[in-house]
Amino acid sequence: MNKSKWDDLRRRAESILGTSPGRDPEPGEYDILRLIHELEVHQVELEIQGEELRQKNVELVEIGERYMQLYQRAPVGFVSLNVKGRVLEANQAALEMLELPKSKIKNRGFSNLVHSEDQLDFLEILGKVNRVPSEKARGELRFMKAGVAPFYVHVEINPLKNGMGEVQGWLVAFIDITRSKKAETELHEVCARLEDSQGQLKRLSARLLSAHEEERKRLAGELHDSIGQTLAAMKFSIENTLGNTKRGKAEEANSLLEQLVPVLQSAIDEVRNIYSGLRPAMLDDLGIISTLGWFCRQFMATFPNIHVELTIDIDEADMPDGLKICIFRIVQEALNNAAKHSSAEWVDLSLRGERGWVDLVVEDDGIGFDLEDLNSHPVNRPGVGLASMKERAELSGGALSVLSAHGTGTRIEVRWDTSRRQH
């Protein structure tokens, strides 16, 4: 209490007691003065308490402002709901993630912002908080961006309580996890493709082993039927020649030796055909262009009912050396498939490209086949050759595509990007 107020109070007290300022107070006046002093003390205490309350109020306002700044600027979306589940407030991050203005979200039922297929999950999460109000609940849901585009969020719901501990609503916090969910989905897809590739690799390995065994069987048959029989005939002819020589029949011996020369030449030709089929020497000596010309001629000699039209539009120098044997093996396999399975009469074989890329196409006019049926029944014979060609193409950095249908023939194309390959 300031001095003027104290003096006024003092004068009024003296007037009531009928005393003058200069007179000594009567004994009863001491009680009034003591009361006045106590009132003054209480007034000072109240003023101090009032100042402290004003200071506390300022601090509370500052804390509230800092909280609102954190609430509004947080990278996490915050949405406050009342007990009916309607939106009271939403921070900037929530509005940006939902792509809605505040006017479109305030007082709106929050469940309407949840994907229709996830609304039951949202209510289940909210129910966990209701059953145990002191606990929080979390989960993964899909919210709707601008009301039309779903996106994945990780959501956490906390109860909002008043001073009595009563639940007045909920605070929903969420972050966008669409990228991580997409990455997770892609990872699952990659794992599924990897498992499928492993299965295909096992089936391919089994088919390749079978093909290798059949190739060995074929070579063994050729050696037995051609070289074996030729050598047996040569042995028989040499034995007869030696017998005639010992009996002094020189003319008959010379005649047998003359007959032996074409047989020996035939054996040489058979051996050449066999090792040329395994690895043609001219591939290393003359290159892939000359080798393909030779192979097409040999193929048409073996299968005279099939004509092969060869088109070359690439320079030998523009093809990496390591790619040439792969091209030859794919052509070899494709033409053998055409001869064995397609009933084709005409085959167009083209090799085109320049520095940076190589394109190989083998197309026939045969009966074709159903690709889906082939994929569902991998034991079909054409599948072995196609799988082998596909594996060769991919291992050499190429991409193989097959077009075929019943009655439309078959087109096999392989394209290599050779810009990063070394010659």
Image (tube, rainbow, N blue to C red):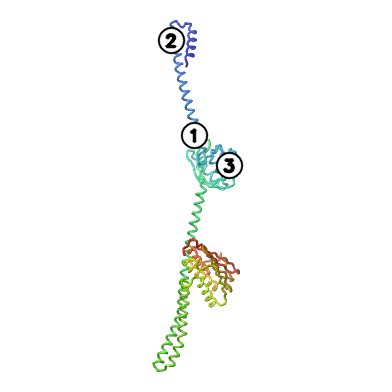
Can residue 214 be seen here? The reply is: no
Q: Position of residue 270 (x, y in %)?
A: 47, 79
Assess whether mark 2 and mark 3 are in contact (beta carbons under 8 angstroms).
no
Q: Position of residue 94 (x, y in %)?
A: 54, 41
Amino acid found under the numbered disc labelled 2: Tyr
Q: Earlier in the sequence, mark 1 or mark 2?
A: 2
Label 2 element class: helix
Q: Relative to residue 392, is residue 112 depicted above or below?
A: above
Residue 30 is labelled as: 2
Q: Relative to residue 257, is residue 350 depicted above or below?
A: above
Q: 10 Å neighbourhood of mark 2: few (<14), some, or many (≥20)?
A: few
Q: Earlier in the sequence, mark 3 or mark 1?
A: 1
Q: Which residue occupies the foreground of this view, 124 or 271? A: 271
Q: Position of residue 64 (x, y in %)?
A: 50, 32
Q: Which residue is mark 3?
A: 100
Residue depicted at 47% across the width and 29% down the height: 59
Q: Position of residue 305 (x, y in %)?
A: 57, 77
Amino acid found under the numbered disc labelled 1: Arg
Q: Which residue is mark 1?
A: 66
Can residue 10 be seen here? The reply is: yes
Q: Which residue occupies the foreground of this view, 5 or 260? A: 260
Spatial CA distance of label 1 from label 2 is 54 Å
* In front: label 3 or label 2: 3
Determine the residue located farthest toward the right in the rendered image.
407
Label 3 element class: loop
